[in-house]
Image: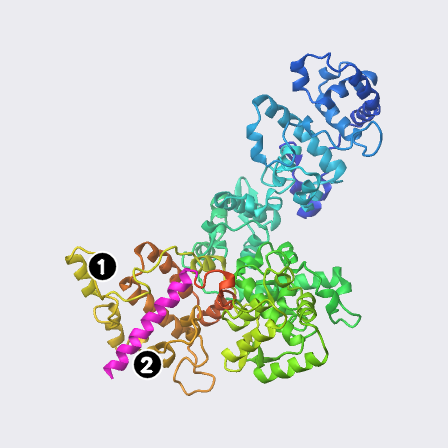
Amino acid sequence: MFRHGWPVPSSISFQPDEARACIQLPEFDALLLEKARVISSRFPLAEAEFRTSRGKAPAAEANEIPHFEKVFRRAADMASVSKVTELREYDELLLLTAWHCVRPGVTGFLGTYPKSLLCPLSHAAPPVALDSLSAAKRFVFERRAPIYLRYLLCEKFALRTCADIENADLRHLLRSTGFRLIRPSAVPEVAFAGITRGEDPPVRPWKLTLRQELSDERAAEMLITAALWQIKYGLRLVTFEHGQPRWNIGAFERTDWEDAFLSLGVRVAPSIMRASGLLDWRAVLARCLDKIGPGNLPPALLGKISAVPQRICHDSQQAIWEVLDRVARTVFEQVRGAEPQLFTEHGGLDYEKARGFRRWARLFDEVSPNILSRFGVSAFTALHRVAPEYFGWGPEQLKPWELEQEYGKWKGPRGRALLRSAYAFALHEAGLGSIENQEEQVVWQCTLNQFFAWAARRAEQAIPAYDFLYGIASRHGLTPLLSREVTHTAAVSMLAGMNLHENLPRIEGSWDVCMRTALERHGGKLEVRLVLPDLVPLPLRLRKAALTPLSYSYLHKEIRLVRDFDLRLARESHRQLDEVPGWWEDERIMGTPLLERVNATADPARVVLDRLRPEPWLEVPAQRIRFRALYLLIAKRATTRPTPGGSGLSSEEIRVLLRLALEAALGHTNIAEVSVPAVRRGFERILAREDTREMLDSLLLHIGAAYETEIWGQVRKFIVLDVISDLLALTLRNSLLHLMSAE
C-alpha cells in the first residue's frame, strides 16, 4: 500500500521498526551524479577562465547570480553538457556539482560548500530569518533546499532508510554542518515530501520533534495523533470491518495506557495533565475513542475510561514508583552492558572510572523521555532505589553530584544544597568530622574538639592551606570553588547557615578562623544534613504552584490577622487598612473565623492543636531559618505524645493544620488580594497529596535546605511557599496563644 507517494509501513510488517527499516530513501539518478562529477572536474579550468573574463557580464546579472553558479555554467559547457540552464534537473545538477567541488586543501577546488546557492543568508541563521527574503529568493530556497538536504542526509550522514532517520540525532548532525535554516524536526519532510504524513507515516514526526519546539496546543495535538497511531499500528488493538471498528477487548483491558502513551516521547501539555501533574491517560484515550469509535467495547469498560473523578494522590505504586523503578533498572542494565569498564571483574563498581561517567540522566531520557522532570526526582534517587549498593554515601559509592552533568549542576537553591552536601562530604574524606545515620538521613557532624585535633594533625604534616583546600575541591569536582565563583570561606558560611566570611581578611588561615567561628556559633557542634534521594516525587505542577514568585510585600512589615472590626473601621472611615493606626498590634483571633474553629472542641484542627508542643511556635527563633514553620510541622518531636517514635505529626494531621490556615486565616490576613489566588493554588496542590509529610520533607530538602547568605543574593525571596510558611506560623501561634490564655 502507498500513501502520499510512500509505502505504508504497516502493510510491510507488523513490527513498526522492522517495517521502516525496509523503506529505502530515494537515491539520486546515477547518470545525474556522473554528470555532476564530470562537471566538477572542469571546475578549476572554468574558474580560471571566468576570472579572465570578469567584468564583461551585465551588472544586474552579476549581482543576482552566485559566483559558483556562474562558474558552474562555464564548467558545464566545457563538459559538453549543453544548454544546462534549460535542463529540468538544473537545480539538482548545480547542487550536486557543488558537493563534488568541495575538496579542502586541493588546489583549484572549493574548501567549503558555497552556501549562497540556497539563499544569501548564513546557514547558521535561525528559521525566522527566512522571512526577510524576497519572494523570488524564497522561491529559489524552497526549490533547492530539498535537494541540498537529500544529499546531506543520504550521502553525508549515510542515512539509507526511514528507520535511520528516526534513530538519527538530526539536531546534532545538522549542527555539525552549521545548518539551522530549517528546524531539525522539519528536515525529513522538506527533503522527502510526504514522508511524515498519514496515519502510519514512514517517519513518525513525534520521534523527531524536540519538546521546546512545541506549543502547548501543538503538543496536545501531536500526542493525540501519536496515541492514535499507537492504538492502531503499535499495539494493533483495533481492526476495521466494513468501516466499523472492532476492538480486541482482552488486549484493551490488559494495556497499561499510561506507559503506552508516555513511551511515545511527546511532551505532555497542561490540557491533558491531571491535577497531580501526571498524564491524564483517560482523557487521551477518550479523545482517541471519539475519533476511532467505540465499536464493540462493552459499556462497562467505556464507563471506566470516561470516569471524571480520578485519584490525584502521588503514593500510588503504579503511578510513580513501579514506573520509575522499571526505567531505572533498564538504565542500569544498559550501562552495565555498554560500559563494562565501569565495573570490576567481580561485579563491583570501579569508583574512580565510574565517577567520571556523566550520561546517567541522558539515558533516562532515552528510555522514557522526560521521566525524571515529570516525576520531580533526580537520577540518583531512581538509581539508589534499584541499586543501593552502587549509589549512596559510602567511599566506593557514587554520590548525587557525581551522576549529574556539569552544566547547571550547582545552580539554584537545589544546586546550592548539593554543593553544601558535597563540601561537607569532602571535609569528611579529608579527615574532619564524622558521618552519622539518623533515621534514614545522613548527617555530617563536627565538634570543636574534633576540629582542634584535626587542625593539629594538619599542622604536623605541614600541608599549606592552599594545597589542602584546592585538593578537596579538585578531588570532588567542586567547580564553583575551583573557578572561585564561591570562596572556601563562603562555603563554610553555607555549612553554618549564616554569613561568617564577609569581614574576614583574605589571608592564609582565614578558613580555619571561619570554621572555628561556625562551630562556636553552633554551640561547639555543627551538623549538616547531606542530600538524600528525593523522598517522594514532586511533579511539575506542584513545584510551579509552590514556587511561583510573588512580587509584592504585605500591607504591613509582616503577615498579620485582620479582624472584622479593623475592616469595618477602615470602610466606615474611608481609609485603607494600612492607614488605620495600630490594627497590627492586637494578636487576638477575635473577629476572625479562627475563633469559632479553635473554640470547637470537636473540630479536627482543635484536636491537633491540643497535641502540639507550643514552645517552638511561641518562642522567638535564635536564627531566622527560611520555612521554619514547615520544618516545625515535620519535626520528630512536634507533639506532646509520649509514644517513642510517634511524637511527630502524621500526614493527615499536617493536612488538617494546613487546611485550617487556608480556610480560616487566608481570607482575614493582610496578603494582597492580587496574590491570594496563587497562594490558594499552592495550598490546594499540597493538600491534594496523601503523603504530605514526606512530600514537605522532600520539598524542603531541595528548596529550603540551602540557607540563604548574602553571597547568594537576597536573604528572603518571596514565593508562594514563603507565604504558606508564614501563614501557617501566624495561624498556629495565635491559636495556641488563645488556647493558653483561655486556660
Place residue 527 in its image quadrant. Answer: bottom right
Q: Dominant secondary structure of the magenta stretch? A: helix
Residue 473: tell me if it is visible: yes
Question: Is 730 within the magenta?
Answer: yes
Magenta stretch: give its range: 717-743
SS assignment at label 1: helix
Residue at image location 74% in from the left, 72% down from the top: 348
Neighbour tally class for label 1: few under 14, some 14-19, many 20 plus, Cα within 10 Å: few
Quadrant placement of the C terminus: bottom left
Q: Which residue is mark 2?
A: 610
> Could you tell me residue 648's position as x and y percent?
43, 79
Q: Disc 2 to disc 1, how far (Cα)?
A: 36 Å
Q: Position of residue 272 (x, y in %)?
A: 47, 51
Which quarter of the figure is the N terminus placed in?
top right
What mark, if any, has residue 667 been given in the picture? Answer: none
- Outermost residue, left direction? 572
Kindly report which numbered mark, 2 or 1, lies closer to the viewer in this rendering. 1
